[in-house]
Amino acid sequence: MARVLVVDDDQALSEMLGIVLRAEGFDALFCDDGSKAQGIFNEAKPDLVLLDLMLPGIDGIEVCRKIRAESGVPIVMLTARGDTLDIVKGLESGADDYIVKPFKPKELVARIKARLRKEDPKSESLTIGDLSIDVIGHSVKRDEKEISLTPLEFDLLLALARKPWQVYTREQLLTDVWHYRNPADTRLVNVHIQRLRSKVEHDPENPEIVMTVRGVGYKAGP
Amino acid sequence: MKYFYQFRQAWNKSLSLRIIATTFAVSTLLVTIIGLVLVNRVSSGILTSKESSSITEASSAINEAQRVVVATDTGAGAPTLSVVVDTAVTALAVRAGQSGLYDVLFLASPEISKQGLPERGTNLVSENSVNDELKSRVELTDKLLWSYTKIIYLDGRSVPGLVVGAPIKINNVGTYSLFLLFPLDKEEETIGIIRSSVLATGIFLIFGLLILVWYLTRSVLAPVRKTANAAERLRMGLLNERVPVSGEDDLAKLAGSFNSMAASIQQQIGQLEKMSRMQKRFVSDVSHELRTPLTTVRMAADVLYESRDQYTGETARAAELLSTQIERFEILLSQLLEISRFDAGAADLSLTSVNIKNVIEKTAESLSNLLARQETPVVITGHAPDIEMDQRRIERVLRNLISNASEYGAGKPIEVEIGSDDEAIAIVVRDKGSGLKPGESSLVFNRFWRADPARARTTGGTGLGLAIALEDARLHSGWLDAWGAPGKGTMFRLTLPRVAQTAITKSPLPLGTGEDEKLELDMSALQELFNVDTKSEMP
């Protein structure tokens, strides 16, 4: 049973989220204060975090950054504003995905499941640029040195590496990696490509592994 | 031609050039006229006085000569004619004195000179100094005659002068002509000096005037220019721009008024900005405060809705209503917030280069469920080059137009036409449904306006969609207009500038159908015919 940590200061919403999550077979944990989130996270080791951006104590973006500093656990932000700036800030601080209030329960559950979905690992060994990817071990190595990626970043790199001949549009990546049915916000892709590059490229300014194809999208490097 | 054009440009652009050139022209004209009049008056005065003194002198000199001739003639010993002539000329020369007040020519009349009679002159003066006309006139008169001439000397010199002539009768010989030649070179010199002084004074005056005007223009224009520059910087948004005020004259008043205007503008803008900020803040707060409880309610309603099978009929229906109406409420809330963002001027564009055809296809795709339910196909024709736009907003406009068209289109195909010219692209969305009534095409963009109030409750539109679409178009500096006729369907045209945020003057696609316009024309022609007929029938 997957464990979801809900970090939100609104009691009613937290309780409601609990009802919905339990109905879908998740185990829900709650935290109503940003400053306590880190402690509860370390203690409970959840499989996914639902994080409100507006929190008492320290705000959601800071919480996100702290959790991401220690763990690659999927983080989905709950945001009340459609504000561009907040969403981009949240994504840059390490959130994998976001959902704007008010949302439908089904939509939320779909997002959570997409983030928790594990494909049947096939024994596969892939290379992209000078990186080697071990799909079963969920690890990426350069010169026998492991590079630590979050599951989302790993999936993103894997998608590009599996079809090195293909140019992915942002919408396609949203469908394949984020499992969106109606791809909407391509900023998600932009932000995570930047984060991925900062980890795997020698020089993120001149990418050699995740290449930009102007006006189309991204493809694996040569 | 080129220089003329450049000059025209400089002329139109520079006030100081115009002032200086005008001053130059007017002062030159005035100084020339004044100078000419002055020189004329002075020189004619000098010459007149010289003339009258010369004639007085001449008349007494001639009397003297006549007297000498008569005395010599009648004296004892009866001297020869040569002696008579010499005596007369000598007497006159003595009268004229050393200074050479005048020169003398004592000539025999033409008809007697042929006989080799003696003729005399003083100081090598030439006979040619007196023209023939004067010579012949002097013979026939007994009065003094004078005229201006050029006194020529045998050594080649010549000076301007006045010649006074009179006949002298010598007994037994006939008439001699006596000419006194008064040189005017002194007077000429004086006039020359006066002329050049007047010219120098005139040039100096014009030059001084130009410098004065240039200085005055500059001292007046400098503050004006300064104010103009300040106004320009103010326009560019530097609201702290002010002009230094010095003195209490008109220019200081200009600077003062400008400064108080700038201060007032700054204050107004500050106020508006503050209001806009407060509005933005309010919208954002309302948005946040409302959305969190709404999310909870929404989820609760969904949970109830999902398990409606477990309730009795009426409770199940209540759960259903709760769920659908919350959805409606949600849409309404988000549209209200959007509208209030527009009203506060808080809406901004995030531009990307997009192909409009792709956007239309994508929008139609996202509406495929609705379109399939209404069994309405969408036909897209035409194409346009990529332009910069806020894709999210334009998609929203198109979604609104296409879903409206499918709702009112009575199942007939929706035609989407794309067109472009060099300044804009246009998209026309047309349905073939019942159409708008006359006058309604201007009302459709009003907030909460509905074509059919009774119908709205069932289709669930919020009445804000087109108002938001219009704001979205305006935010792009574009147009959104509507056309409709009963039974001919409805047409919406979105026009967007090819270069973002520039004004457009015309749309690449027409609004309305060509045939209707033709019909209207025919109708008016008929009307006119009819009017003419009725008039001709009148008595």
Image (cartoon, coloured by chain):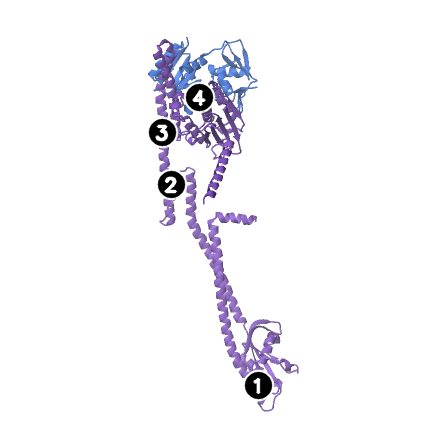
Chain colours: A blue, B purple
Q: Earlier in the sequence, mark 2 or mark 3?
A: 2
Examine the rendered structure and indicate whether residue B314 appears above or below residue B101.
above
Q: Residues within 10 Å of mark 4 (few under 14, many from 20)?
A: some
**Where is mark 1, residue-wise?**
B69
**Residue at 44% from the left image edge and 20% from the top image edge:** A91
Residue B473 x, y percent position in the rendering = 45, 30
**Where is mark 4, residue-wise?**
A92
**Residue at 54% from the left image edge and 72% from the top image edge:** B184
Circle 2 chain: B
- Say the numbered circle drawn on residue B279: 3
- Say the numbered circle drawn on residue B262: 2
Q: Which three-letter amino acid code belongs to the residue tagged 2? A: Ala
Badge 2 marks a residue whose secondary structure is: helix
Residue at mark 4 to residue at mark 2: CA–CA distance: 43 Å
Circle 3 chain: B
Is the residue under label 2 in contact with that under label 1 (CB below 8 Å)?
no
State the residue in front, A211 or B532: B532
Number of marks present in the image shown? 4
From the viewer's perspective, is the residue at label 4 or at label 2 nearer? 2
Image quadrant holding the C terminus of chain A, namely: top right
Using the rendered image, report if marks 1 and 4 lie on a common chain. Answer: no
Is the residue under label 2 in contact with that under label 4 (CB below 8 Å)?
no
Left or right: where does residue B514 sit relative to residue B222?
right
State the residue in front, B218 or A16: A16
Q: Which three-letter amino acid code belongs to the residue tagged 1? A: Val
Image quadrant holding the N terminus of chain A, namely: top left
